[in-house]
Image (cartoon, rainbow, N blue to C red):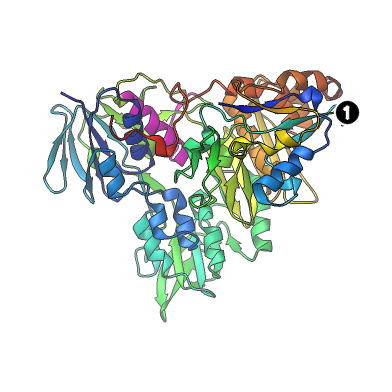
Amino acid sequence: MSVLKLHPEKCTGCLRCELACSYMQTGEYQPAKSVIRVSPFEGHTSYAPYTCTQCAEGWCMTACPVGAITINAVGAKDVLDDKCVGCKLCTIACPYGTMFYDPATRKAFKCNLCGGAPACAEACPTAAITYEDVATADWLGDFAVERTARVLAEAR
Amino acid sequence: MAARHLVIGGGTAGMNAIRTIREEESERSSITLVSAERPYSRMVLPYYLDRSIAESHVFTATGKVLADWGVTAHLGKRVTALDTSASACTLDDGTTIPYDDCLIATGSSAVRAPVPGADGRGVHSFWTLDEARGVITQIQPGGHVVMVGAGFIAFTILNSILSLGAKLTIVEIAPRILPRMIDDTGAALVQAWLKEHGVAVRTGAKVARIEDVKGRKRLKFAAGGDLVCDVVIMATGIKTNLEWLKGSPVKVNQGIVVDEYLRSSVPNVYAAGDVAEGRDLISQKAAVHAIEPTAQEHGRIVGANMAGKNVRYRGSLIINIVEVCHLDVASFGAWDDTGAEAASSVKADRPAYRKLLWRGDRLTGAIILGRSSDIWTVNDVGMLKGLVQSGVSLGRWKAYLKKNPFDVKPAFIAAKTTSTLLPETVLGRPSKAPGETPVAV
């Protein structure tokens, strides 16, 4: 399957991915409702997007007591709104912190790869997010080690 | 001859086991389910109570689904005896069912505090679907509900009662609320939050008796004034449903003692969920968790092993979350470990609290409180679970997190937690979607 491959060294922190994601997912240009989240590193001199890995276990999916999380046609774990009751078990089961909850609709939501045409990847002007047929991986770990060295040195 | 599997109990553990048997088996087996109730999810009953879902939404398998899955179901029946030497069980209607292997997943029941009047009219438990049906018709807008008990179960229905327009008073015998889910600091914050939202809380309050008074209920206490209300809900604890197993050689301690494959002391008898005393992931000690995620993982492991796999279970992680009037309250792992190194922080400007617990440079437990509308709270809930579950070595990030417990993400990412977590699966293979279960192997 294709997944979102993240290239943090290319991210400029422009947040277009968050706008595109929220618009695609909710119909509103509201980064607060984006399921891809850009984080600053090294005192806001570097940035990296972070989102669901579409992990093999699918902790969110197996935790759901009513079978409201399924695998969609492109292989993404996807919340079925009509089945989700808003119990939040998925938000504590997901060990990556990539489940979201909307208090207005009382539903959980997450990255569903936009059904095969991810809006974030399309919107990214620097190709820091690409949609590719590769195995999912820890795209940010090495980058974060390098770009947090100073913050970490100060924490001692 | 194809294997004959017997599943006793149609709750989360039992239904996950059945589904996993069908996912994993190489040859179609016979599955018999004995369940006192139609299979449903207890987790979603609060949403049935507040009428945001219909009763039909709570069922996890209809008769048709069970038939599609090839399950012979004895619903509304209870097992009265297990003859492990003959490998057969007897039901309350006299039916005998022979098996090759068997899963005990009979769950637990609500227990009421032993006070006079606790079994009277207008006094309810909220645990089973039948009990939920009994409560739903009684809570009226403007009515007064008294909840006896301030534990996790009580808190799962708190929002529902308020959203029905009732006035709520919580009484708790202990000096504080949520004693088995969060620490004193967290409990004090939640109690203040409840007060702000119009919920009265009386701690250290021992109910002496419950009386009828002009069609309403009156609670008398060992000390302090009476409370008069319309409905009493007793959320005073649960006990495992294991009385029926007395006299069998299946070894029971706090629950049925199981090995890392979830087999009991009788090799062809498994146990899962609330009745199983399995391994705790953090302490690696035997424990009864009685939480939904443990029941679900136990059920899947047993299902795979009944289907002939040999799947070892790492142990289960305690995870709990409740939403209290739009405040998320969650805890993970060994949050109450007095021998752990701990760091905590309360935000002065908003209801937010974090407590992180360490053994060496590994996070072994966490408590988190924050507004549900705050996405960082929701994301950090997951990442803290990931740090505890993966047990990654945090090295110098430990010092950072102790100073900055509200900034979890850089530590999570830079400790390469994702790399550790990605290969982790419960069954040693990618999970299947709920609708993908092969029904005709």
> Disc 1 is attached to a residue of which chain?
A
Q: Is A68 covered by the magenta stretch?
A: no
Task: For the C terminus of chain B, give its image quadrant.
Answer: top left
Residue at screen point 54% across, 26% down: B282
Question: Viewed as shown, does residue A41 lie left or right of B76?
Answer: right
Amino acid on which disc 1 is placed: Thr
- Magenta stretch secondary structure, dominant: helix
Residue B416 image position (x, y, % from top left): 68, 21
Question: Viewed as shown, does residue B25 lie left or right of B143?
Answer: left
Q: Is B295 covered by the magenta stretch?
A: yes
Instruction: Provide the residue designation for mark 1.
Output: A45
Residue nearer the viewer, B98 or B201: B98
Residue B357 image position (x, y, % from top left): 65, 31
Residue B34 image position (x, y, % from top left): 24, 43
Asked which secondary structure carries label 1, the reply is loop
In magenta, the rendered stretch is B284-305
Task: For the N terminus of chain B, give its image quadrant.
Answer: top left
Residue at screen point 69% across, 22% down: A139
Residue nearer the viewer, B69 or B194: B69
Residue B381 image position (x, y, % from top left): 64, 39
